[in-house]
Amino acid sequence: MVSRRNFLRTSSLLAAGTMLPGVSHSNVLNSLSAIDRVNVGLIGCRNMGWYDLTDSLKHPNVRCVALCDVNRPLLEKRAAELDKDYQQKVDLYNDYRRLLDRKDIDIVIIGTPDHWHCLQFVDACSAGKSVYVEKPIANSIAECDAMVYAANRYDTVVQVGQQQRSAKHWKEMIDYLNEGHLGTIGQVNVWANFNYGAIASHVADSPQPEGVDFAMWLGPAPEVPFNTSRFNGLWRLYWDYGGGLLTDWGVHLLDMALWGMKVNGMPNKTVGIGGNYFYPEGGHETFDSLNVTYQFDNFVINWSNNAGIETGLGGRNYGVMFRGTNGSLVADRNNWEVIPEGSKLSYRKSQADNKDHQDHVTNFLNCVDTKNRKTSCPIETGSLSAKYAHLGNISARMGGALLTYNEQLKHFDNKAANKYLQPTYHHPWKFPRTK
Ligand SMILES: NC(=O)c1ccc[n+]([C@@H]2O[C@H](COP(=O)([O-])OP(=O)(O)OC[C@H]3O[C@@H](n4cnc5c(N)ncnc54)[C@H](O)[C@@H]3O)[C@@H](O)[C@H]2O)c1
């Protein structure tokens, strides 16, 4: 099993933003255009939501007026930080609906675990807010549909937290691919190998920590006793709240594969095979070893994740590799390079500027200011890559079923697979409309 010490090291790196290249820590912004004053409320304050907020606050006209979390001590700690570092006093909420009731809030950032995104997003849209929602947009395919429907119904300006969409070097990569240098691309490989994907261990249930409202943490998910192994961050490894490395990293990286290959719909076929083979004694439900193939008319996209090891293709523990007849292009958040096939191409390398997260937040603020729904990552883009991630997990959870998903009819060609499309919400939470 991955040692807790190793995981803690990984998760503190995550928390420090070093696993998220592009989360810039400079206090000065010079790339923002002047925007009118906006008030922000943050729902889910521990990790990524906090980075989304603090990068927003680098703009002088953005003010945080409310924080919401089900963990009271954390909420108070964040409020104290806002007061000390930004001289901003905020109101604190346990129930996000009370934050949404506030008429003075223009923007809501959703940084909760994946199983909460759909309800909070739909409610924020219907309350007339602009929304920055973290990825994957949802923990199921039907929730993705409900969110796309709500955003269009309420004409909401949305940015999905897939910040690679705002990165200079990824955009340069797309231009390079569009210019056709690689020849015929028949295969794209996408992979993510991270220790934290296998960290959850079996621990006894325990009383919920002082100041934590675990029933509200669970919300629409099935009722279970409190267990530290499902809580802060670790929820990613349990199907009721997340989808393992395929939803966590897959939405970022598959998004690049789909963008590069100009894919706007579902694949012809999907097959996923996985299991917990590296760490069978671990507590995680999501697969530590997983391969998924998405088949299209003229190419395949392959996903692979290995949790508990951190090495990978081309010396990169995560990345995307487009394989063409003239050469291959391999990319991660640091750079991309072209590996020629014989002498058909010249070697080329392009470096990241590490501003992707800040630029992504800035793009959102500018779009809110101008009421422009064409953000760098609108809800439809987030929905597409989230659905790909769920397709792969569903096939693998069925032991390797070969699946075709019909986007018009919104079902699979396989009855057993259809039961994975929509979670049963726990009372009193109601599944939102999808049309
Ligand atoms: N864009 C990126 O690169 C990136 C990186 C990390 C995480 N994320 C995404 O951000 C989201 C949050 O991940 P994390 O790592 O910050 O998780 P986390 O567990 O560290 O933080 C989630 C926070 O939400 C709070 N919360 C839970 N239920 C709530 C509710 N009903 N109301 C209010 N608060 C509630 C929790 O108490 C916790 O403080 C996930 O969707 C994740 O995939 C994105």
Image: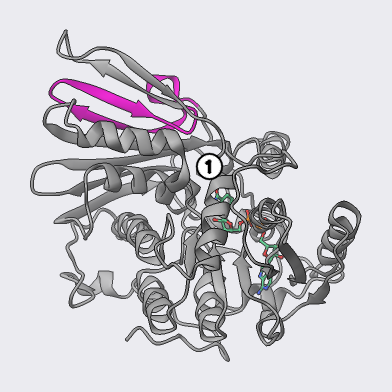
Q: Is residue 53 shown left or right of residue 159?
A: right
Q: Quadrant of the C terminus?
A: bottom left
At 62% from the left edge and 61% from the top edge, which residue is drawn? 35
Q: Residue furthest top?
A: 343
Is 200 placed above or below 69 here?
Answer: above
In front here: 294 or 180?
A: 180
Give the residue at mark 1.
356
Q: Quadrant of the N terminus?
A: top right
Q: Where does the magenta region start and end? A: 311-334
At 49% from the left edge and 29% from the top edge, which residue is drawn? 352
Q: Secondary structure at mark 1?
A: helix
Give the amino acid type for the residue marked by disc 1 in the picture: Asp
List x then y, in percent, for residue 238.
Answer: 53, 60
List x then y, in percent, for residue 60.
Answer: 74, 56
Is 137 placed above or below 103 here?
Answer: above
Looking at the rendering, the quadrant in which ligand 1 lies is bottom right
List x then y, in percent, for residue 323.
Answer: 21, 28
Residue 380 belongs to magenta span: no
Q: Residue furthest bottom?
A: 428
At 79% from the left edge and 70% from the top edge, which residue is drawn? 208
**Residue 174 appears in the rendering:** yes
